Amino acid sequence: MNPRLLTILGASALVAGVFPHAALAGPAFRLACHRVELKGSKPQHIASSAWLVIQGQQRLAVVDSAMNRTLFYDLNGIPDRKAETDFSRLVDLPAALKGSGANLIAADARNSFLSVDKNLTSVSPKLPLPGGSGTGQVEKAQAKALLDARYRLGGLKEWSVIDNQVVGFGPLRRPAHPENDSDYGFFAAPAADLADITDLPGPHALNKAERDYFRIGTEFVASSGSNSFVLVPRTQEHGEPSMIWKVKSGENGAPSRLVPFAELPEGYEHVPQITSRMGGPQGVEVLFAELETLKMPVALLGQGESLSLIVREPGPDGQTSWRLYRMSRVNTTGGEWQGPYDLPTAARHLHPLSNGSTLFFLEGGRVSYPGVEDVNSVLVCNTPS
């Protein structure tokens, strides 16, 4: 198939921002996109996705939580059956797959974290369950440290592998207070040693409505160059605006922390409260139907020296408008938001990811009981770094 090339020029906008990195600038680049149809088996519901290079071949990996499988596709949407078979031998109940290269980490339905060889030939435990199949492969002292770390993290809500570290958000239970399951916060840990967890202080605690955004499949942790960023959502009730924070490494042995970096574009200062319950197959259908009615950010993605913010907004005809804002020079002085740029898609739900230079959007349809979502294509967009 020869995909149709779609070129979109962003509408001009100039809005004075309160925060120095929050202004909008007119269009400064062309967003060129084409669509690739997925062949063979298609994912029923996307829990996670990653862009990998397996034995020199680029592959899109998609964790299909509805079917307990991970699908692999090449650049033309053709399935890679060998990669699927190799991965299934290593991770039998996949829940998430993040990272790339030597730092490819999978989570399974047992709440174990596994380090996967980049060529899908071997796997080793990162955070195994007590008595799990992986604990016998490490020394007892190391296994205890890993188990303590897994307990401390509780249930992760959002995490990403960025260069050589894992950055995420979840309930950081302190060993001295094991009954406390509401101490949510951001954290970082070396990808090579997830037991070495460090809190990332900075933002005020998130309320329940704001924490919900880390449970619905948003991608709010991103990297650009050697820097990590997180999008901290805020509801109107909180008073503070939603903001992008930057992970700042400590100096002279001081711990890392989050520092304010940029506000979101005008109209996205606050996120709406999600009212749907998030439990059970019926709840998934109701939740995703509600998301189609909300104006909200859905992803923060890194590309070279730039950040891209993906937002959704319901239209009067029931269709969702998908837009992209872009900020360059984020690793030096920071810049202005450029855009918005309309994404050429009529999808009800998008699952975005970046390989560092190209943006990919898995296009999903309406989610129906028991959480099945038809995903038939991927929108591929290129922008200058």
Image (cartoon, rainbow, N blue to C red):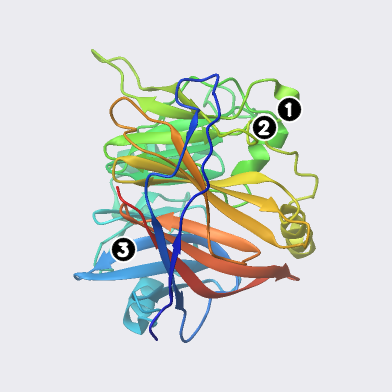
Give the Cα separation between the discs numbered 3 and 1: 39 Å
Q: Earlier in the sequence, mark 3 or mark 1?
A: 3
Three-letter residue code for mark 3: Leu
| Residue under pointer 3 | 52
Left or right position of 6 against 115: right
Query: Where residue 26 appears, x then y in whole percent?
Result: 46, 39
**Residue found 31% across the figure and 14% down from its top:** 254
Left or right position of 198 against 95: left
Q: Secondary structure at mark 1?
A: helix
Instruction: Check contact, mark 3 vs mark 1: CB within 8 A.
Output: no
Whether residue 360 is visible to the viewer of this picture, yes or no, is yes
Query: Where residue 261 appears, x then y in whole percent?
Result: 44, 25
Which residue of the protein is positioned furthest toward the left in this rendering?
Answer: 56
In the rendered image, the quadrant that contains the N terminus is bottom left
Query: Where residue 105 appears, x then y in whole percent?
Result: 36, 54
Three-letter residue code for mark 2: His
Q: Secondary structure at mark 3?
A: strand
| Count of picture labels | 3
Instruction: Check contact, mark 1 vs mark 2: CB within 8 A.
Output: yes
**Residue found 69% across the figure and 46% down from its top:** 295
| Residue under pointer 2 | 270
Give the Cα separation between the discs numbered 2 and 3: 34 Å
Instruction: Check contact, mark 2 vs mark 3: CB within 8 A.
Output: no
Q: Earlier in the sequence, mark 2 or mark 3?
A: 3
Whether residue 107 is visible to the viewer of this picture, yes or no, is no
Left or right position of 174 against 179: left
| Residue under pointer 1 | 236
Q: Secondary structure at mark 2?
A: loop
Label 1 neighbourhood size at 10 Å, few (<14), some (14-19), many (20+)? few
